[in-house]
Image (tube, rainbow, N blue to C red):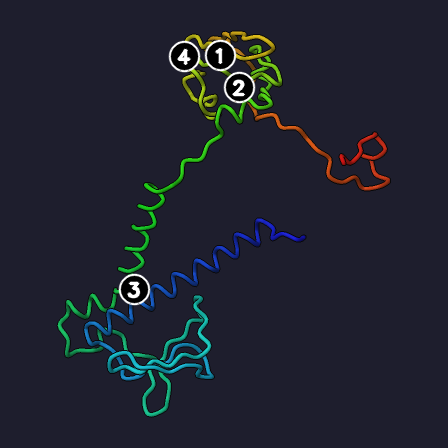
């Protein structure tokens, strides 16, 4: 099975984003224009041929092959069967200036409101995901070189930090562990053991920029071996 590369996926996200922004912008522009009565008698969206035609209030809307992307999104006014560039909002001189202003920037206002709503949603409705202590200690942790210097070993199960029970993996990356004068981390290694280290030890280490723990340990299963290559020659085999 083939998967899109990260670059292709990012490009797809950008295209979808442009499509949504374009649809929101022109839909808001049209809605504002219809509400205030600042519109042409007939609009044509997209390229020929016409695929759909309907009326909204007193305005006729024709839909062709509409491509909602920059430089490809086309909107025309239709007059006497001929397509031409639609008039801008400020060209409707018979309307008050304030109404013309809101009509001209209706799409921008809509994008601004959508952005605010998305930001609120991300900030207040984001699901807090984390690795629990039970998951972290299923197979233990893999310490960094700094962690090994301070006394950690692969497979250690982290139980407490300064006497308080650990509930999630990201507690091991707290700045307090590095800034406190003395830190005591209790691990389960056959029996419970305390690993005690000081800020001075970390500062004097050549590996002081590393985190204490690199990752969580997980068992590795070999899914496939390519015949004749190094893995097979070194004795690895597919687990059945």
Q: Residues within 10 Å of mark 4 (few under 14, many from 20)?
A: few
Residue bearing the label numbered 1:
185
| Residue 63 in the image: above or below residue 209 | below
Percent of width and height locating residue 231:
80, 34
Percent of width and height locating residue 19:
43, 63
Q: Residues within 10 Å of mark 3 (few under 14, many from 20)?
A: many
Residue bearing the label numbered 2:
212
Element marked by disc 3: helix
Q: Nearer the viewer, residue 3 or 147?
A: 3
Q: Nearer the viewer, mark 2 or mark 1?
A: 1
For the point 38% across and 66% down, the residue is 23
Which mark sits nearer the N-terminus, 1 or 3? Answer: 3
3D distance between C-alphas at marks 4 and 1: 12 Å
3D distance between C-alphas at marks 2 and 1: 11 Å
For the point 29% across and 71% down, the residue is 30
**Label annotation for residue 180:** 4
Percent of width and height locating residue 227:
84, 41
Q: Nearer the viewer, residue 155 or 13?
A: 155
3D distance between C-alphas at marks 4 and 2: 14 Å
Which mark sits nearer the N-terminus, 4 or 1? Answer: 4
**Toward which corner of the image does residue 88 lie, by quadrant?**
bottom left
Residue bearing the label numbered 3:
107
Element marked by disc 2: loop
> From the image, which quarter does the C terminus lie in?
top right
3D distance between C-alphas at marks 3 and 2: 50 Å
| Residue 104 in the image: above or below residue 81 | above
For the point 47% across and 56% down, the residue is 14
Q: Determine contact: label 2, label 1, CB under 8 Å.
A: yes
Which mark sits nearer the N-terminus, 3 or 2? Answer: 3
3D distance between C-alphas at marks 3 and 4: 53 Å
Q: Determine contact: label 3, label 4, CB under 8 Å.
A: no
């Amino acid at each position: 099975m083939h998967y899109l590369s990260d670059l292709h996926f990012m490009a797809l996200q950008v295209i979808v984003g442009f499509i949504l922004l374009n649809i929101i912008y022109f839909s808001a522009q049209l809605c504002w224009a219809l509400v205030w009565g600042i519109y042409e008698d007939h609009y044509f969206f997209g390229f020929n041929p016409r695929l759909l035609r309907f009326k909204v209030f007193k305005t006729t809307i024709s839909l062709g092959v509409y491509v909602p992307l920059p430089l490809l999104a086309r909107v025309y006014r239709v007059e006497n069967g001929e397509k031409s560039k639609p008039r801008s909002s400020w060209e409707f001189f018979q309307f008050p200036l304030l109404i013309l202003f809101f009509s001209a920037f209706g799409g921008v206002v809509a994008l601004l409101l959508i952005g605010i709503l998305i930001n609120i949603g991300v900030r207040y409705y984001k699901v807090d995901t984390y690795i629990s202590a039970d998951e972290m200690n299923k197979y233990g942790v893999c310490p960094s070189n700094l962690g090994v210097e301070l006394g950690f070993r692969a497979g250690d199960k982290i139980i407490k930090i300064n006497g308080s029970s650990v509930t999630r993996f990201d507690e091991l990356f707290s700045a307090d562990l590095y800034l406190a004068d003395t830190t005591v981390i209790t691990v389960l290694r056959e029996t419970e053991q305390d690993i005690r280290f000081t800020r001075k030890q970390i500062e004097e280490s050549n590996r002081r920029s590393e985190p204490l723990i690199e990752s969580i340990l997980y068992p590795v299963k070999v899914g496939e071996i390519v015949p004749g290559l190094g893995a097979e020659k070194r004795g690895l085999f597919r687990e059945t």
